[in-house]
Image (cartoon, rainbow, N blue to C red):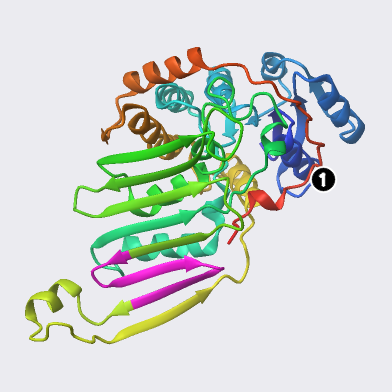
Amino acid sequence: MDIVRFGIVGIGNMGSAHAMQLFEGRVKGARLSAVCDCREERLQWAKERFEGVSLYENYESLLDSGEVDAVLIATPHKLHPIIACRAFERKLNVLTEKPAGIDTASVARMNQAAAESGTVFGIMYNQRTNQLYRKLHDLVQEGLLGEIKRFVWIINNWYRTQAYYDSGDWRATWNGEGGGVLLNQCPHNLDIWQWILGMPVRLRAFCREGHYHQIQVEDDATIYAEYEGGANAVFITSTGEYPGTNRMEISGTRGKAVVENGCLKLYLLDQDEREICYTSKEGMPQEKVNCQVIEQKEAGGGHLDILQNYTNAVLYGEELLAPGIEGIRGLTLSNAAYLSAWKDDWVSLPLNQQEFCEYLCKKQESEEAMQRNVQHENLSGEYSERWSVRW
């Protein structure tokens, strides 16, 4: 194989942008061969722009066409595992949009199908291409901050209006989207959290549903998590605050790291704080702090970097920046947060998948249809600024 023929299932906002990049040759070694959508107006949009690209109304037909080597899934969240599993049955490579799904049980089945297929499975975790997050990931793994004490991330610059939620009847519903800010806006952030620090052993969450908007899912959430070694984490997010904040701080026994406003700032001690605590004769010593500033020179290629890396993985075996099987980890955090909020109690990890699904089914069954003046967004075929790292 010298070129990867992509088929895109779902050509809404994200799918149309991916399609345009592939069609215009911005991904070396990749070609857009087919697109699929159940909405006639979207297929007409694609027909007018993608000459020579096959159009399908049914994803099964696309999968059976023999025209694609890889399937890029950009549908509503709950369909990701279903379509992926069907593609794996046909030994097709899969790149899925985030989140991996809406429940870890279905995602676990998808991961098993991926492993059995022997194909390349990736997920569109574009924030992993950001140089500051990548640098911080490496520094923490190397032990530069010592033993981790605390992680705090305030990421509430996800402001959305009611018009945003009214742009699709599947949005902000338990049946259509499967959740709110944690499942729509924050999968990237939850992934970065676990990618850098790993998974906690238990958490307690508070999710306020319809707090800022006329929706039935959460638009404001706070998670408190604890780690086996004694570290804790706090994650705060919302779509109802403007202008909002994006600040991550990690504290360890050798200092702290802060990521904000396009900078990674390191405040490092010459001696481990635990040693200082038990050897210093002073009650409030003034220890020397070495400061380093790493500025973000470029935002990172985001979606295009993931597309290129994924294409290279299919063609040449390049290591994936975002393996698809890792999508279950961030989803575990959001599933556990929902379960904690619904039960008003702590939730231990690994997550009880059956219990979560039972609670989710109750939410879906009791959900009332909301009257909305749905006005679908116009497709631009470009990556919106809202999908980039926003400081």
Residue 314 covered by magenta stretch: no
Residue 125, percent across and down?
A: 54, 45
Residue 44 higher or lower than 153, as above or below: above
Look at the image and tell me in which quarter the N terminus lies. top right
**Amino acid at the residue labelled 1:** Glu
Residue on which disc 1 sits: 24
Residue 220, percent across and down?
A: 49, 42
The residue at the point 27 percent across, 53 percent down is 232
- Quadrant location of residue 74? top right
> Viewer-proximal residue, 128 or 170?
170
Look at the image and tell me in which quarter the C terminus lies. bottom right
Residue 42 higher or lower than 324, as above or below: above
- Quadrant location of residue 106? top left
The residue at the point 30 percent across, 40 percent down is 204
> Viewer-proximal residue, 270 or 248?
248
- Helix, strand, or loop for circle 1? loop
Residue 220 visible in rendering: yes
The residue at the point 30 percent across, 68 percent down is 145
- Quadrant location of residue 170? top right
> Viewer-proximal residue, 268 or 215?
215
Residue 319 visible in rendering: no
Task: For label 1, count other residues whose C-alpha is less than 10 Å away and answer few (under 14), some (14-19) or many (20+).
Answer: few
Residue 384 higher or lower than 203, as above or below: below
Q: Main secondary structure of the magenta part?
A: strand
> Viewer-proximal residue, 195 or 78?
78
Residue 229, percent across and down?
A: 19, 52
Residue 282 higher or lower than 24, as above or below: below
Segment tinted magenta in the rendering: 251-267
Residue 261 covered by magenta stretch: yes
Residue 188 lies left or right of residue 243; in this view the side is left
